[in-house]
Image: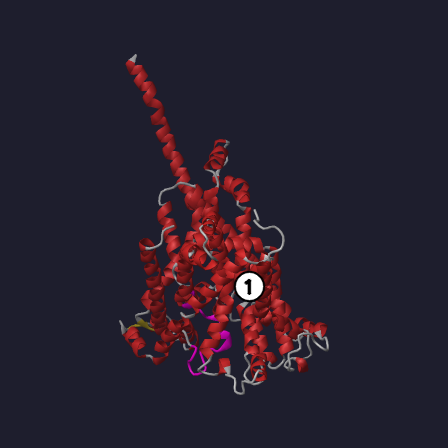
């Protein structure tokens, strides 16, 4: 009796196991089928290329030579980079460009708070400040090119009209070109950051403000003690993505200045493009790409560390 | 919910100030639009004429669209590339997202990690090998090549995966008991349930592809295959001083985006907020 009971109770699990096993096999197969297009695409278009970039950084090669023309030169590309004035200038400009991030974060945060709490027609404001972000950068850059035109462009006409006799030549002036591009970049970035700040604001519990009001807190105290600290994860996220985005700036420079005048607006990605696709120095450009990759990795890693340490969700 | 019903004085003042700010913020667009309606001689007249004295809109747009420059061809190329890229990217991202969230299989987490890691790689760091690969497998200078570059989106996979994870597993299980396989469950149950998320991603992908300057710059060589961003840049250098025409071309290129954005703004803004805050 006991034996029968035992077999009876034992058998079903065994069957279920075997069936479960074949089921699992089927699941694995369909799982792989569903993700394989993505995996294949990412492997061919991202994974293999990043490995190739790391390898090509150690080569001296030109597109037109064919694969036989590759010469391995060890670390020479990297040591050349350290002595390359244009490269150093690009890196320096990249770092100057970082200043745009706190500027547009501040503006976006203020706009987000105002739009979230203190205005009518919220929908209109969200769209209005977001329009530059969705617009085609090339078209927008061309508009700015005309607006910034030194001798008869609208901006300088206006400046002359309010009594500035000798307004800057903006993108045509080596001293003002980078800052002009930075201004355009701030203008474009505000919308995106503002939208994310508004989302962050909406996740702050309303009763915190009500409690603060009962305690007699004024608007500034509420901002300093509630809004700002509770927005810090959002700020942190936007800071990191913003910093990474500055390393990718390309369109505006390609359209407006091509790195000029006299190298004043060259940035790493522009220099990479120019070296690889204009001067065809593939190995050297790959070394620049490796440096770019390392910078972005470093920031990502730093973010990961900082997040573990400071940010509590 | 409003504590003080009726009109709030402070709120009105802030609204007015913010409205003035937004007009200033959008002034470059206003200038672009107005200039595209003007005759060339009026473009740089000072003080700036915010309403053209002499309307030349029809002539300007006609000159851009039906002039010597094959603007309609480039417009068509842009539509083609953006629509196909969007459709392909939505399908492949949704499939991967479903696979990574609703099918339990070995190596799933590991493979997803690989996909996620590639997201951290800046696109420009891999341009050169991509170029070499494209030259060697015949994708260089083709629309198919451009489409493929925009198709495999980690962001799309990640975004849609979040939504698929929000679906109850019971939907899937009960469909399985009824004998449906994963392709059927994906297509007729899961995908319709996350339609809003797919729409959001589709709008974003369309905007990004439409605006993409860098990929066509590097991967397209033939004039007849150009998409709008480069076509507009070329048009600008060819038209020289004809700013009214350049602005008409710019307006034509931006307009579809603004329309799509205003129609789908709820989707776009929510998608960006979600992808941003949670991504």
Q: Which residue is mark 1?
A: A129
Question: Is A263 covered by the magenta stretch?
Answer: yes
Tag 1's secondary structure?
helix
The residue nearer to you, when weighing A237 against A12, is: A237
The residue nearer to you, when weighing B255 against A22, is: B255
Q: Position of residue B88 (x, y in %)?
A: 52, 54
Q: Position of residue A253 (x, y in %)?
A: 47, 74
Q: In this image, A306 relative to B18: left or right?
A: left
Q: In this image, A282 relative to A150: left or right?
A: left
User: What secondary structure is the stretch in magenta mostly built from?
Assistant: loop
- Splitting the image into 4 quarters, where does residue B277 fall? bottom left
- Splitting the image into 4 quarters, where does residue A83 fall? bottom left
Q: Residue furthest top?
A: A1
| Chain of the residue under the numbered disc 1 shown in the image | A
Q: Is residue A127 visible?
A: no
The residue nearer to you, when weighing A108 against B39, is: A108
Q: Position of residue A117 (x, y in %)?
A: 53, 56
The residue nearer to you, when weighing B55 against A84, is: B55
Q: Tell me where the magenta segment starts and ends, as one range.
A: A245-265
């Amino acid at each position: 009796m006991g034996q029968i009971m035992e077999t009876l109770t034992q058998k079903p699990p065994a069957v279920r196991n075997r069936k479960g096993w074949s089921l699992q096999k089927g699941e694995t197969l369909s799982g792989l089928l569903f993700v394989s297009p993505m995996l294949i695409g990412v492997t061919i278009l991202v994974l293999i290329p990043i490995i190739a970039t790391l390898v090509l950084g150690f080569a001296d090669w030109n597109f037109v030579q064919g694969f036989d023309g590759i010469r391995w030169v060890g670390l020479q590309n990297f040591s050349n980079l350290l002595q390359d004035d244009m490269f150093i200038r690009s890196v320096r400009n990249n770092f100057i460009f970082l200043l745009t991030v706190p500027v547009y974060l501040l503006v976006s945060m203020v706009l987000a708070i105002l739009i979230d709490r203190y205005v009518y027609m919220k929908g209109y404001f969200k769209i209005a400040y977001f329009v530059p972000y969705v617009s085609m950068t090339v078209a927008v850059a061309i508009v700015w090119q005309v607006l910034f035109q030194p001798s008869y462009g609208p901006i300088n006409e206006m400046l002359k009209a309010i009594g500035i006799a000798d307004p800057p030549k903006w993108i045509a002036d080596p001293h003002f070109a980078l800052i002009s591009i930075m201004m355009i970049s701030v203008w474009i970035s505000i919308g995106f950051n503002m939208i994310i700040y508004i989302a962050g604001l909406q996740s702050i519990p309303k009763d915190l403000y009500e409690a603060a009001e009962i305690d007699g807190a004024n608007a500034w105290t509420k901002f300093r003690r509630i809004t700002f600290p509770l927005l810090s994860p959002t700020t942190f996220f936007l800071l990191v993505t913003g910093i990474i985005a500055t390393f990718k700036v390309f369109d505006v420079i390609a359209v407006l200045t091509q790195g000029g005048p006299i190298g004043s607006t060259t940035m790493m990605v522009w220099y990479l493009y120019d070296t690889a696709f204009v001067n065809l120095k593939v190995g050297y450009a790959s070394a620049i790409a490796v440096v770019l990759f390392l910078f972005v990795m470093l920031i990502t890693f730093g973010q990961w560390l900082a997040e573990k340490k400071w940010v509590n969700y | 919910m409003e504590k003080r019903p009726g009109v709030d004085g402070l709120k009105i003042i802030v609204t007015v100030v913010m409205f003035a700010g937004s007009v200033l913020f959008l002034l470059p667009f206003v200038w672009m639009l107005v200039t595209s309606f003007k005759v060339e001689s009026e473009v740089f007249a000072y003080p700036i004429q915010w309403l053209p004295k002499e309307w030349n809109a029809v002539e300007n747009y006609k000159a851009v669209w039906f002039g010597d420059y094959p603007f309609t061809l480039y417009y068509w190329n842009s539509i083609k590339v953006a629509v196909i890229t969007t459709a392909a990217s939505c399908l492949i991202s949704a499939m991967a997202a479903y696979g990574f969230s609703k099918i339990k299989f070995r190596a799933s987490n590991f493979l997803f990690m690989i996909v996620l890691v590639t997201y951290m790689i800046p696109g420009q760091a891999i341009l050169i090998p991509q170029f070499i690969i494209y030259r060697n497998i015949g994708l260089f200078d083709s629309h198919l090549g451009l489409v493929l570059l925009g198709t495999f989106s980690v962001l799309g996979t990640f975004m849609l995966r979040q939504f698929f994870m929000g679906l109850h597993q019971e939907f899937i299980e009960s469909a399985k008991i009824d004998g449906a396989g994963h392709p059927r469950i994906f297509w007729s149950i899961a995908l319709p349930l996350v339609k809003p998320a797919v729409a959001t991603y589709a709008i974003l992908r369309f905007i990004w592809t439409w605006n993409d300057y860098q990929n066509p710059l590097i991967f397209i060589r033939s004039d007849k295959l150009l998409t709008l961003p480069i076509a507009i840049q070329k048009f600008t250098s060819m038209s020289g001083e004809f700013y009214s025409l350049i602005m008409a071309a710019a307006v034509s290129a931006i307009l579809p985006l603004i329309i799509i954005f205003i129609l789908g703004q709820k989707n776009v803004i929510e998608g960006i907020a979600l992808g941003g805050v949670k991504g």
